[in-house]
Amino acid sequence: MELNTPVPRKLPRQICPICAVEVEYIDRYPRYVCGACCDRAKSADGRVLTFGDVIFENGAYRPIGYHALYMDTGEPHDSHECFIDGIRCLADQAHFGGIVIAVADMWSSMRIVRNEIDD
């Protein structure tokens, strides 16, 4: 084997704990849910939610930190808690910006598989 030959790298598998679709492996967020599941996030009373960490103001985006709004009225939802298909989740600002939603209970996230797959 040549010294400059790259060694094939193995990546762990990560599965959305709600719908079981394979998602990008992100060690920081082992229980994060896929985008399709995020789109189904609702409040405890069943109202659809939207999340963000910036607002558009005076022709530019301005960071304001985590916020959640009720989709039907635009009113603030003053909680990080949401439910996807009846499973309790928590939404928050991601480490490098954006929003991440993760299953709150580790027992609900047992679908995460850390088998190795080829890069």
Image (tube, rainbow, N blue to C red):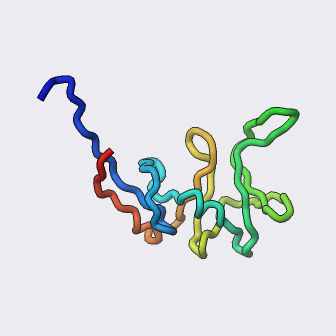
Does residue 94 appear to the left or right of 20 in the view shown? right
The residue under the point 30% across, 52% down is: 117
Q: Position of residue 14 (x, y in %)?
A: 40, 56
Does residue 5 appear to the left or right of 79 in the view shown? left
| Image quarter of residue 3 | top left
Does residue 37 appear to the left or right of 55 in the view shown? left
**Which image quadrant: the N terminus?**
top left
Q: Position of residue 84 (x, y in %)?
A: 61, 69
Residue situated furthest left in the rendering? 1
Number of disc labels: 0
Does residue 109 appear to the left or right of 3 in the view shown? right
* Vertical order, 4 against 66 (above or below): above
**Which image quadrant: the C terminus?**
top left
The residue under the point 40% across, 67% down is: 111
Q: Position of residue 92 (x, y in %)?
A: 62, 52
The residue under the point 81% across, 40% down is: 56
Q: Position of residue 81 (x, y in %)?
A: 65, 64
The residue under the point 28% across, 53% down is: 116
| Image quarter of residue 5 | top left
Looking at the image, which is closer to me, 2 or 104?
2
Looking at the image, which is closer to me, 43 or 61?
61
